[in-house]
Amino acid sequence: MRFLFSVPAWRRLACAAVSALLLQACVSFPDAPQATAPPELAGNAVRSMDGARLGLQRWPAEHPKAIILALHGMNDYSGAFALAGPWWAEHAQITTYALDQRGFGRSPDFGRWAGGDTLVADLRAALAAVHGAHPGLPVFVVGHSMGAAVVMAAQADAPLAVDGLVLAAPGVWGGRALPFPYRLTLNMAASLAPGKTLTGERAKRQATDNIDILRTMYRDPLVIKQTRLDAVLGVARIMGRAYGDADKVEGDILFLIGEKDEIIPRKAMEKAARRLSGETEVRRYEDGWHLLFRDKQAETVWRDVAAWIDARSTVIETPRVSLADRPAAFQSASAILQTAR
């Protein structure tokens, strides 16, 4: 009797089957929480749709022409915009709100991955709160690295209530963009030891040429230094989601790439940029690293973002979301959240 497959071939098939199972390993993250209250700004926090208070920093312009809601990258927090925010307020009359995403900074569950759906829902809630506080002003969302991945995932699900997207060094190194052995190893490790932490020191990669900023971040207790394995898996999944759904991302988009980025491969960013469905403007910075808003040449990036926003900013005479309409607007936002799940 002759067998169709040799023993080595059977082994390869078995390994492939096991690998497929492991890639859908038992690591899971919470669904987005149920909406229970209208989102609103509350001092140095945003009250999200489930009542959770998310950390917030703001840099108000004296006579704002536009509003930015800014999302930081992995293990960072709203302090990522502590240089850009004041500059935009003073030189471009743009008010910036920078959010501590859930699991980061001063927001709940510090150091734990909240789940991609939760981060997307928090983004929508924060936007609703910002619109409620600034009816009639154009609103833009700026995402850096992981924050840009969250923005892309949200926009692919259902259009965000914004006038444009700024994607800076977007985290799109996940899903199909990651080598299969890396995905397999990460899923296995996160399944077996989700709470084990990594520091990233062995990676030998530099995030910026601004050494003073690196030292400041190292001393800042709100910057996560040791990352849980399940959080590494979580960010890889949201980045994979952003990369995989890039062709569904529409709207006015400014896409920023640092030529010296050692964190997110340029090829992955370039492929994602080409697949976007919106009116996309790609800008490259020869001396730009991953922390584009804090590199030594950061002011060039601040100016470019401000000019791009200024060209798209018009004050709307009829407020988009008046105070009287906020309950109805919240119901609409809640419906979108439910649909996106």
Image (cartoon, rainbow, N blue to C red):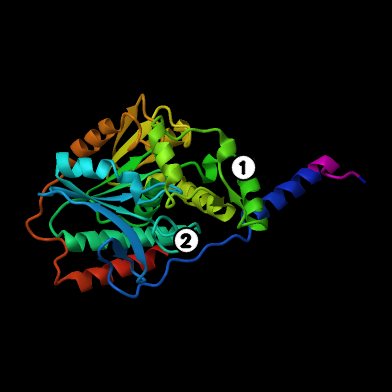
Give residue 245's position: percent from left, percent from top: 43, 48
Q: Nearer the viewer, residue 218 or 151?
A: 218
Does the magenta run of residues contain 207?
Answer: no
Give residue 121's position: percent from left, percent from top: 37, 62
Q: Say if 208 sits above or below 9 in the image.
A: above
Labelled pair 1, 2 in contact (Cβ < 8 Å): no
Quarter location, residue 131: bottom left
Residue situated furthest bottom in the rendering? 36
Between label 1 and label 2, give the one nearer the viewer. 2
Q: Nearer the viewer, residue 23 or 32?
A: 32
> Which numbered tag is attached to residue 298?
none
Report the predominant secondary structure element of the magenta stretch.
loop
Q: Is residue 89 left or right of residue 273?
A: left
Hey, what amino acid is under mark 1?
Tyr
What residue lies at 43% left-to-right and 27% top-to-bottom? 260
Residue situated furthest front in the rendering? 219
Residue segment shown in magenta: 2-9
Hey, what amino acid is under mark 2?
Ala
Does the image show residue 6? no
Quarter location, residue 276: top left
- Residue on which the image places disc 2: 114
- Residue on which the image places disc 1: 182
Q: Rate crowding at label 1 as few (under 14), some (14 to 19) or many (20 or more) other CA atoms within 10 Å.
A: few
The total of numbered circles placed on residues is 2
Q: Rate crowding at label 2 as few (under 14), some (14 to 19) or many (20 or more) other CA atoms within 10 Å.
A: many
Q: Is residue 129 left or right of residue 150?
A: left
What residue lies at 39% left-to-right and 34% top-to-bottom? 212
What residue lies at 45% left-to-right and 57% top-to-bottom? 116
Residue situated furthest right in the rendering? 1
Which element carries disc 2, helix, strand or loop? loop
Q: Say if 309 sits above or below 316 in the image.
A: above
